Image: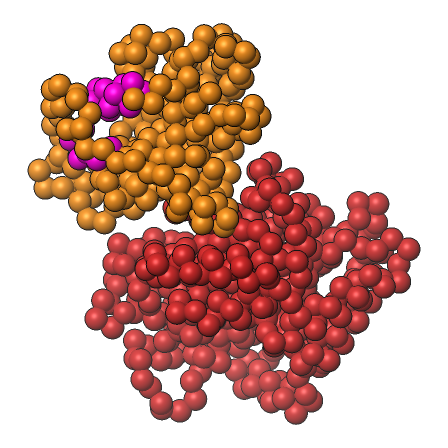
Chain colours: A red, B orange
Amino acid sequence: MNPGLAVLQARLGSRFSTDPEHLRTWGCDWTRAFAPQPAAVVWPADTSEVADILALCSHHHLAVVPSGGRTGLAAAAVATNGEIVLSLDRLQHLGPVDLAGRTVTVGAGVANQALQDHLRPFGLWWPVDLASKGSAQIGGNLATNAGGLRVLRYGHARHWLLGVQAVTMAGEVLELGGPLVKDNSGYALAQLLAGSEGTLAVITQATLALAPLPGPTQTLLLACPSLAAVVETLTWLRGRPIVIDAFEVFSEFCLQHVARHTGQRRPLPTTAPWYALVEFEDPQSLEIDTILTGLLEGGAVSDGAVAVDRQHSARLWQWRERITESLQAFTPHKNDIAVPVAALPAFGADLLAWLDQQPHPHPLPVAVFGHVGDGNLHINTLRPAEWTTERFALACKSLDDDLFALVAAHRGSISAEHGIGLVKKPWLHLTRGPAELAVMRATKRAWDPQGLLNPGKIFDL
Amino acid sequence: MKILVSAKRVSDPNAKLAISGDGKWVEGDVEYVMNYFCENAIECALALAEEHGDVETVALGIGDSDETGRFVRQGALARGIDRGIVVSADEGTIDSDLIARVYQKIVEKESPDLVLIGKQSVDGDSNQVGQLLAEYLDWPQATFASKVELKGDQVEVTREVDGGLEVVSLSLPCVITADLRLNEPRFASLAGIMKAKKKPLDEYELDDLDLGDAAPKVRIAKMTTPSGRKSGVLVKDVDDLVAKLRGEARVI
């Protein structure tokens, strides 16, 4: 056994664990394709303890996997190889809200929802809105450059990041950026950490830019005969004098799964192949009338439900937000691709044609949902109950080869918001060239010369 | 057949309310939603109309005339209720008794066969209007309905009572108060929202209703917010937990 483990245990006491239950829980994220096998889990209490732990691990040549709310979908926070899992759960500091500058500084372990609760009394929020906001932590949101439900209006997590405090594998504490809105002085290293999936440094604290809470919003669930009709509806709405907060899509197949999972009555009396969930800031009521009339008469929408108050809006959102959990029992293989919004109808047609031609005797059920406004689709393949994990994994691998070729042909991305982690590593070269990958590897070596921080994630060195 | 159904707006139970300085009302921007139990009453009226045909449905809202009108239109008429009635009143002072007497006057004007009311509002929590109305009208009543079936000139109502269900049969006309498990309310449809704009919405002032004494009998003396939750403690081990549960919490 590595002698560093005993040193860590002596240093941290009950905040060090090798309990198999803890190793299983903290050793992985929401993915289930890789078995967690960490050597230990540690829960540092503050930044200086993070620095001590990382220096100690460097000294003893122990690899470290940083871990947040463990809601990631790319296996970027999975420890498969005897690493030390460094949980940021205890970094719960919620700093005072700076109302003039609209910033706040918080610990990496603060849950997204806890941050929003902290900000709400000031009429502010951090506009990274995730279905998993109850568990997902700010450090993880930043390290994965999380997107979520409001990217259309607000952009990814990196757009609302001003500065981070981060610790390198050598135990060096870096203060990168801060509550400065303007700061053109050298490389923006805090931004480099956004989306680095814990491979460059451990984020311990972040200074975030904040936005005013949106005004009253109008939520609609629209039924559309095709993906082309969904995009046509988006195009039409973008031409209206409204601010669109979210434009989500899901298939009838997803709706059926949520209905079964929640036992709720279907939201519309009619069925359609596709549904769009739209939310926009409520303009004057006159404008809404023209919008609803336009939707009804435009021909791209066959039916629709309108939320008349906040409670209805929350109920409509359930149909989108609960898709992931309703599919969980089928241990889905998840893809998170993006194509240019304008290419969505053509991509959608190719995708459906390809699904119809699946070479297997029993075509695999596929759930398609996502953020149409961003050109981002989550394509989940469900495992038939009688299939072994191995048979399913093999089938998915071959499906992925085809799917990603299709994505590359439409000039898309193989990972829109989930990241690369372990899950998408084999296909990164499809959309990132050799020269670009070489720069990424050199960057990794500059931050972590020993290659001990979250090794094997995104790419191999 | 005609059904009169309640459509009350309430402050959003998920929002944090601030109590005004004199402790008698809330202040600041209050976000409103349709009272959950009224949603059940509306859904029940619509389902009965769909099942039996030839049923006219009328929704009644009492309160700030513009805002209540908007709620009646969007929350009731847009879902399929045929007509709306709004009685303008100050929501801060009107009490359950006055609301029941307003209902009585509207019932006398409209002569419905059935009045469906949410069993209580989720903000005031009084749970009085349906019962008072049945008394004033001298009609039979069934409260806490989880199932309503029309059988000729009778209505069979399943009621949620402590430890089980009770099935009662009432003759029409009658008053029924709706409970949460009665049904799952539908959403307003796009087409429904557009149609609702053309549906009739009658408005009355309290003075129009010949109520006699329209002064409320109950006034809010004082409101307080719930006391904050005590912060938790970390226990050392199982023995410590048991000792605390027994000694401090006194739950075992």
Q: Of residues B127 and A404, which is closer to you in this image?
A: B127
- Residue B163 to residue A296: above or below: above
- Give the left or right position of residue A57, taking residue A206 as reference: right
- Residue A45 to residue A210: above or below: above
| Residue B227 magenta | no
| Residue B88 magenta | yes
Residue at x 35%, y 59% (from the top left corner): A286
Residue at x 38%, y 79% (from the top left corner): A176
Q: Is residue A166 visible?
A: no
Query: Residue A405: percent from the left, percent from the top?
Result: 76, 76
Quadrant assignment, res A128: bottom left
- Residue A427 to residue A442: above or below: above
Q: Of residues B61 and A367, which is closer to you in this image?
A: B61
Q: Residue furthest right?
A: A361
Quadrant assignment, res A115: bottom left
Magenta-drawn segment: B87-108
Residue at x 66%, y 58% (from the top left corner): A225
**Picture quarter with the C terminus of chain B:** top left
Q: Of residues A95 and B76, which is closer to you in this image?
A: B76
Residue at x 60%, y 51% (from the top left corner): A323
Query: Residue A193: percent from the left, percent from the top?
Result: 48, 76
Query: Residue A364: percent from the left, percent from the top?
Result: 80, 55
- Give the left or right position of residue A253, taking residue A69 as reference: right
- Give the left or right position of residue B90, taking residue B164 as reference: left
Query: Residue A275: percent from the left, percent from the top?
Result: 60, 55
